[in-house]
Image (cartoon, rainbow, N blue to C red):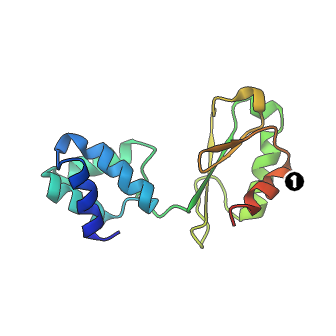
Amino acid sequence: MDNDRIDQIIEKHHGEPSSLIQVLLEIQSENHWLPKAALERVGEKLKVPYTRIQHIATFYKAFSLVPKGRHGIHICMGTACHVRGAGRILDAVQDRTGIKPGETDLDLKFSLETVNCLGCCALGPVMEVDGKAHGKMTPSQSAEVLKTYE
């Protein structure tokens, strides 16, 4: 991400140090991760110490300091999804993508995470891709859903 784009995001938030989290969220949304150079630029422009920014970026799970895939896959492993076969969905997604939870594929296409609950228990097992929930999944359906993101 170039400095001009970072500056635009900061200006959109009026350069206020209190907008730090919003600025970081916007950079994360566009770039899929927070490079060190971007954090340094934000600190310089907002006059916030780099150590403070680093602390925030590592505290919140929404932020990543390593490159993430263009498509985020979340598999619900909560009780309702678990008893309905979430483990099989996870296995199918791992087979299809070649990655395990917490990993990103080499093409930066997919990142895979497990979560404790997505809040739609009646639809279990649930797989979420880019914020869109896919419910009552089967292993073969999960592969079909992923095809649409390739």
Q: Residue at x 35, y 64 (%)?
A: 35
Query: Quick one: quadrant of the C terminus?
Result: bottom right
**Please, which residue is most extreme toward the front here?**
12
Q: Residue at x 68, y 62 (%)?
A: 149
Image quadrant where residue 104 sits: bottom right
Other-residue count near label 1 (Cα within 10 Å), few / some / many at <14 / 14–19 / ≥20 = few
* Residue toward you, 7 or 18: 7
Query: Quick one: quadrant of the N terminus?
Result: bottom left
141 to the left or right of 51: right
Q: Residue at x 18, y 48 (%)?
A: 14
74 to the left or right of 85: left
Residue of label 1: 140
Image quadrant where residue 43 sits: bottom left
13 to the left or right of 138: left
For the residue marked with disc 1, what is the amino acid? Answer: Ser
In the image, residue 26 lies at what x, y percent? 37, 52
Residue 143's place in the image compared with 113, above or below, is below
In the image, residue 120 lies at what x, y percent? 69, 29
Evaluate whether residue 75 shows in this view.
yes
Count numbered badges in the picture. 1
Q: Residue at x 64, y 29 (%)?
A: 119
